[in-house]
Image: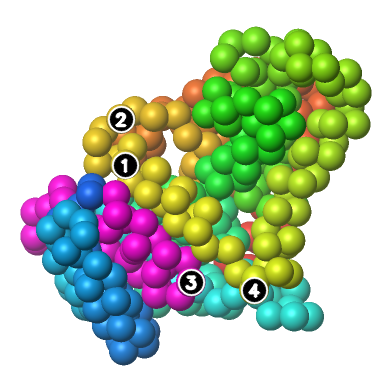
């Protein structure tokens, strides 16, 4: 078996999200080799060529289309492949379809690559992360999803806009499902250590409940709004993929709300959902205990139950 090349990434799936992620990863300078894999080989070749033509403006890199065996020594395998939701299609239909796709993709990756990290980006990401962990046989720390990393970025962005401050100074998480049952963890939200409501009052905002509900709803509905206007979301998630890969390759031990299989925290077991975790070279290196109100704990359990019910029907 090939030993891992720390400077190599594989991207499986060259749709909007896969190709945008490949572009963001090229720009990042984290890798010196990238293989693009798609059921449509021409599409993968076209994306590889298009991105490669910008290399005179970037860092040297080998970018090419390939097969699963070309991913054998990739340190990170980013899986974006999956069907999109069609109008009138239920979520369960989509889940079943994408689990079917994963049943052919994941064993192929695992056949050639035994040591890398599987980063699942395809939706519904929590269900597919769970499926990928089971189908690959990889240790759970090396299979996780992009989860609510993008939702959390949207949350920070909207709070930054609301308070007219740099969104990088906002510390707050969206947790649970990447989807309709996600939870804004307001009780642990702060701006540079100052509790969020105190900071809001410093900036002249006093209608906390109203603002909190509005911001949480806007985060949850962001993707729907973008899809309605331009057909798909891909830049935000591509930057999230870049951020996660950075934490892995540079062994940053960054705290990110990735989707991973839970084992008993907050009474949640044997389902993948997003909670803050330490992410480094070994993948998920530990959970981060987050302070939640009783209401948030109940909402998190409800989110887990929703996911379990879908999983039970689909997998």
Q: Secondary structure at mark 2?
A: loop
Q: Secondary structure at mark 1?
A: helix
| Rendered image: mark on residue 252 | 2
Residues at marks 1 and 4, CA–CA distance in whole angstroms: 28 Å
Earlier in the chain: of badge 2 and badge 4, it is 4
Q: Which residues are magenta?
A: 1-28
Q: Residues within 10 Å of mark 2 (few under 14, many from 20)?
A: some
> Could you tell me if the residues under marks 3 and 1 are in contact, i.e. CB atoms within 8 Å?
no
> Which residue is labeled 4 in the image?
231
Where does residue 144 sit, x and y in percent of width and height? 43, 48
Q: Secondary structure at mark 3?
A: helix
Q: Nearer the viewer, residue 269 or 249?
A: 249
Residues at marks 2 and 4, CA–CA distance in whole angstroms: 34 Å
Where does residue 84 sit, x and y in percent of width and height? 60, 75
- Magenta span contains residue 99: no
Where does residue 117 sit, x and y in percent of width and height? 30, 50
Instruction: Tell me what residue is drawn at x 73 percent, y 62 percent.
Output: 224
Earlier in the chain: of badge 3 and badge 1, it is 3
Earlier in the chain: of badge 1 and badge 2, it is 1
Of marks 1 and 4, the one in the foreground: 4
Of marks 3 and 2, the one in the foreground: 3
Instruction: Tell me what residue is drawn at x 89 percent, y 27 percent.
Output: 209
Q: Residues within 10 Å of mark 1 (few under 14, many from 20)?
A: many
Residues at marks 1 and 2, CA–CA distance in whole angstroms: 8 Å
> Which residue is labeled 3 in the image?
16
> Which residue is labeled 1 in the image?
246
């Amino acid at each position: 078996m090939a030993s891992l090349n720390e400077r190599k990434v594989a991207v499986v799936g060259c749709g909007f999200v896969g190709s945008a992620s490949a572009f963001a990863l090229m720009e990042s300078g984290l890798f010196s080799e990238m293989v693009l894999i798609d059921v449509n080989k021409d599409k993968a070749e076209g994306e590889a060529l298009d991105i490669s033509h910008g290399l005179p403006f970037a860092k040297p890199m080998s970018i090419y289309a390939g097969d699963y065996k070309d991913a054998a020594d990739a340190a990170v395998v980013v899986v974006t492949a999956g069907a999109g939701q069609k109008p009138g299609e239920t979520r369960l239909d989509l889940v079943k379809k994408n689990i079917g796709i994963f049943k052919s993709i994941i064993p192929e990756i695992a056949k050639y690559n035994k040591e890398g990290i599987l980063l699942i980006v395809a939706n519904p990401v929590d269900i597919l992360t769970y499926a990928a962990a089971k189908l690959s046989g990889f240790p759970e720390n090396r299979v996780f999803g992009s989860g609510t990393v993008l939702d959390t970025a949207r949350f920070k962005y909207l709070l930054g806009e609301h308070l007219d401050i740099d969104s990088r100074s906002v510390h707050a998480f969206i947790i649970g499902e990447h989807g309709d049952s996600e939870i804004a963890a307001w009780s642990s939200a702060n701006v540079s250590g100052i509790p969020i409501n105190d900071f809001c009052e410093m900036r002249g905002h006093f209608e906390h409940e109203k603002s909190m509900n509005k911001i949480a709803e806007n985060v949850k509905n962001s993707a729907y709004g973008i899809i309605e206007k331009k057909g798909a979301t891909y830049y935000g998630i591509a930057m999230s993929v870049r951020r996660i890969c950075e934490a892995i390759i540079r062994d940053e031990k960054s705290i990110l709300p990735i989707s991973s299989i839970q084992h008993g925290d907050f009474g949640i077991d044997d389902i993948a959902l997003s909670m803050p975790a330490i992410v480094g070279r070994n993948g998920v290196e530990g959970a981060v205990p987050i302070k939640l109100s009783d209401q948030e704990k109940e909402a998190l359990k409800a989110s887990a139950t929703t996911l379990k019910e879908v999983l039970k029907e689909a997998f």
